[in-house]
Image: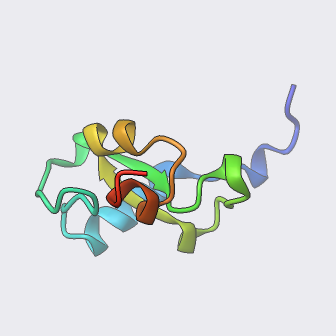
Amino acid sequence: MRTDTDELPNYRTHRHRLFGEQEGFCVGCDTQFPFRVMEVDHMLPRSRGGTDHADNLQLLCSGCNKSKGNKTMAEWRSGG
């Protein structure tokens, strides 16, 4: 059981901030979506050494996030 809950990322806060910064647009498909469809994504996936730091987070729509998986944005965009 985790006891370091104060250190856990607050994705709700990041989601709201990113939604405002990105003006509701998905970074993946450049389509504007309602807030409820957007998901926090790690640009460099945590499974590959990425962090929960704000500068490694972006919003993607659920479809793009699912498609991207554990790839970087460059890999995903190039079809890798």
Q: Could you tell me which residue is drawn at 26 percent across and 37 percent down? A: 63
Where is residue 17? Give x, y as percent.
38, 67
Classify residue 15 by image quadrant: bottom left
Classify residue 28 by image quadrant: bottom left
Q: Residue furthest top?
A: 1
Q: Could you tell me which residue is drawn at 46 percent across and 52 percent down? A: 41
Where's the N terminus, which quadrant? top right
Q: Could you tell me which residue is drawn at 30 percent across and 74 percent down? A: 21
Where is residue 27? Give x, y as percent.
28, 63
Rendered position, 20 above or below 39: below
- How many numbered marks appear? 0
Where is residue 80? Give x, y as percent.
43, 51
Q: Is residue 12 left or right of residue 51?
A: left
Where is residue 25? Give x, y as percent.
19, 62
Rendered position, 65 above or below 51: above
Q: Residue furthest left?
A: 32
Rendered position, 20 above or below 2: below
Q: Could you tell me which residue is drawn at 77 percent across and 51 percent down? A: 6
